[in-house]
Image: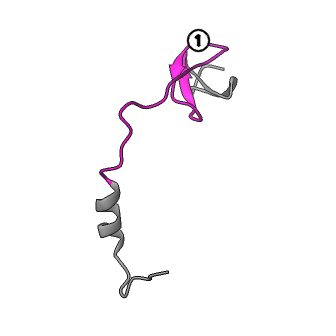
Amino acid sequence: MAHPKKRSSASRRDKRRTHIKCAMPALVVCPVTGVVHTPHRAFWHENKMYYKGKVVMHTAGTQ
């Protein structure tokens, strides 16, 4: 298998990877709140942060 003679820099590698994009990000509906959000990401709803259908964090002062 061929190997590069010189190591390519991180900036050159990242410039090449900028062109790889999805047309539309995937979205899912939370079964608890009904909010549309990106999968595998925490999201805010009514001053609470949800992740995997559970409350992870409250905003400061509202507990």
Q: For the point 35% across and 34% down, which residue is it?
A: 23
* Residue 57 rendering spot, x and y as whole percentages: 64, 29
Q: For the point 35% across and 49% down, which residue is it?
A: 20
Identify the amino acid type marked 1. Gly
Quarter residue 10 falls in: bottom left
Outermost residue, top direction? 34
Q: Indicate left or right for 57 with 36 as reference.
A: right
Magenta stretch containing residue 31, yes or no? yes
Magenta range: 18-47
* Residue 59 rendering spot, x and y as whole percentages: 57, 26
**SS for callout 1:** loop
Magenta segment main secondary structure: loop
Seen in the picture, residue 29 relative to 19 is either above or below; the reply is: above
- Count the marks: 1
Residue indicated by mark 1: 34
* Residue 22 rendering spot, x and y as whole percentages: 39, 38
Pointer 1 local density, CA inside 10 Å: few below 14, some 14–19, many at least 20:
few
Outermost residue, front direction? 1
Outermost residue, right direction? 54
Outermost residue, bottom direction? 5
Q: For the point 43% across and 32% down, which residue is it?
A: 25
Q: Indicate left or right for 20 with 29 as reference.
A: left
Q: For the point 55% across and 19% down, which residue is it?
A: 47
